[in-house]
Image: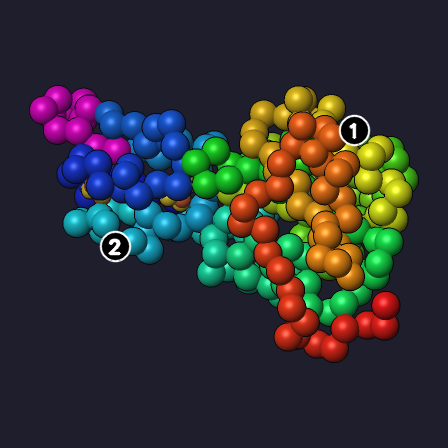
Amino acid sequence: MRIDPEKCIGCGNCSSYCTMLGGIMRFERDRKNPTRIYYVIDEDECVECSVCLRSGCCPTEALYQPELVWPRIVRKNFSDPLKIHPETRIPGRGTEEMKTNEVTGRYRRGMYGMACELGRPGVGARFRDVEKVAGALAALGIGFEENNPVTKLMMDRKKGLINPEVRNEKVLSAIVEFMIPAERLPEVLEVLDRVSQEIGTVFSGDIIARIGEDGSVPYLKEIQGRGRFLSINGKSNVGLGRPLAAV
Ligand code: SF4
Ligand code: SF4
């Protein structure tokens, strides 16, 4: 996103709509007229979500979207909720997100779907950090979800290597998805605990599993044993989607 300095009147409205915290918009003084200020967007920190533009907050239409080309277009693909991912044909974060949309019944008993979410509104994530997580998982021999835009950016899925052209690109958030046999959960959590200390953004993990016949959560003990907790906004699929696969 950019601001036309000739049109900007320095009101600062756009700054309060920006999804990135920490002052990615700064004001500058007009050299010819020092009493006049205008705003400038730090393009390295902007994730191209278009929230500022779409909000209609600018009274002078100074905000504008320049043409985005590779690799910068990746920012918009991952950050603008109205943009459809070219790889998966899914808008938003470009993934079916097992945590919200798992209605296919493909997670059988004894299998866990997992997702590692890097970034959030306010902080975002760089693909170099996504690669650290993917690389640590790949070292365990884990295979990544095929229909996922992060997987599509990998040059070497066996090593979890992301295309180097996008490693420094920043997005609102990115999700690494994979499936594991339930017995591998401890080693996966061990690795995620370690790698979460090595990345420069927030990190959360999702697990999807069928609950027990008695309503119990099969991975609860393992999570609590690590001093972690389940988020209260966990979601339940009651089977109203496509028919459940045979157990
Ligand atoms: S496009 Fe998004 S990240 Fe960039 S300046 Fe606008 S609100 Fe902020
Ligand atoms: S809202 Fe428009 S006029 Fe106000 S600071 Fe932002 S770009 Fe400039």
Residue 33 counted in the magenta span: yes
What secondary structure is found at the residue carrying circle 1?
Answer: helix
Q: Can you tell which of label 2 and label 1 is closer to the viewer?
A: 1
- Say which residue appears at 87% left-offset and 48% top-offset: 181
Residue 10: horizontal and vertical position, in percent? 18, 35
User: Who is closer to the viewer here, 171 or 197?
Assistant: 197
Disc 2: which residue: 56
Ligand 2 lies in which image quarter? top left
- Say which residue appears at 86% left-offset and 54% top-offset: 110
Task: Please say if 116 is above or below 102.
Answer: above
Q: Which mark is residue 190?
A: 1
| Residue furthest to the front | 214
What secondary structure is found at the residue carrying circle 2?
Answer: loop
Residues packed near mark 1 inside 10 Å, few (<14), some (14 to 19) or many (20 plus): few
Q: Please state if 74 lies on the left or on the right of 108 as rendered.
A: left
| Residue 235 in view (yes/no) | yes
| Residue 64 in view (yes/no) | no
Q: Magenta segment, principal secondary structure? A: loop
User: Who is closer to the viewer here, 232 or 179?
Assistant: 232
Q: Could you tell me how far apart the alpha carbons at marks 2 and 1 are, in whole angstroms?
A: 45 Å
- Say which residue appears at 77% left-offset and 36% top-offset: 222
Residue 201: horizontal and vertical position, in percent? 56, 29
* Image quadrant in which you'd find residue 46: top left
Q: Please state if 175 lies on the left or on the right of 35 as rendered.
A: right
Residues packed near mark 2 inside 10 Å, few (<14), some (14 to 19) or many (20 plus): some
Residue 73: horizontal and vertical position, in percent? 54, 49
Q: Please state if 62 lies on the left or on the right of 95 as rendered.
A: left
* Image quadrant in which you'd find residue 88: bottom right
Q: Which mark is residue 107?
A: none
Which residues fall within the magenta stretch?
29-39
Residue 136 counted in the magenta span: no
